Image: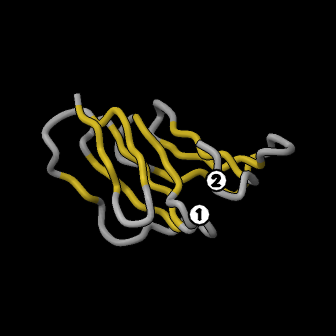
Amino acid sequence: MCSPDGRHIVSGSEDGTTQIWDAKTGDVVGDHLDGLGRVTSVAYTPDGRHIISASNSWIILIWAASNGAAVGEPLGGHADLLLALRTDSTLYCLGFR
């Protein structure tokens, strides 16, 4: 998933980490973000300020894109695997299997 300004790419992995990459050089940007289970979906918010990750442990995390700090508490309670995540200016759209 590319950042709205096209400068960064965010990826999620089976080891539960989310990583930010420089889109031009391919270099890692900062430390990886530790999640709570295999990451199944990642997205930037439209303003590029936050990264949202979802995992197979039914947890959604919101991160500050600037420094990787967690924003608020993990969101949980959905009862099935999150397969897709999309954002617009006001809404996080979730897709479940």
Q: Amino acid at mark 1?
A: Gly
Query: In which quadrant will I find the C terminus?
Result: top left
Q: In this picture, is 12 found above or below 52?
A: above
Q: In the rendered structure, find residue 75 and report the number of the disc placed on it.
A: none
Residue at (32%, 49%) from the top-left corner?
Answer: 93
Asked where in the image residue 81 lies, by quadrant, the reply is top left
**Residue at 71% in and 51% down:** 8
In the foreground, 78 or 95: 95
Looking at the image, which is closer to me, 33 or 1? 1
Contact (Cβ within 8 Å) of mark 1 with mark 2: yes
Assess disc 1: are there few (<14), some (14-19) or many (≥20) residues with their C-alpha within 10 Å of its C-alpha.
some
- Residue at 37 percent across and 66 percent down: it is 90
Residue at the (77%, 49%) spot, across then down = 22
Task: Classify residue 68 by image quadrant.
Answer: bottom right
* Residue kind at label 2, given as amino acid type: Ser
In the picture provided, is 33 more to the left or to the right than 41?
right
Determine which residue is flagged by label 2: 3
Mark 1 or mark 2, earlier in chain: 2
Q: Residue placed farthest to the right in the image?
A: 25
Task: Tell me the distance, in whole angstroms, between the alpha carbons under discs 1 and 2.
Answer: 6 Å
**For numbered disc 2, what is the local secondary structure?**
loop
Q: Position of residue 86 (x, y in %)?
A: 41, 47
Above or below residue 1? Residue 92 is below
- In percent of width and height, residue 12 lies at 52, 39
Residue identifier under label 1 = 48
x, y percentage for residue 20? 65, 50
Q: Quadrant of residue 89?
A: bottom left
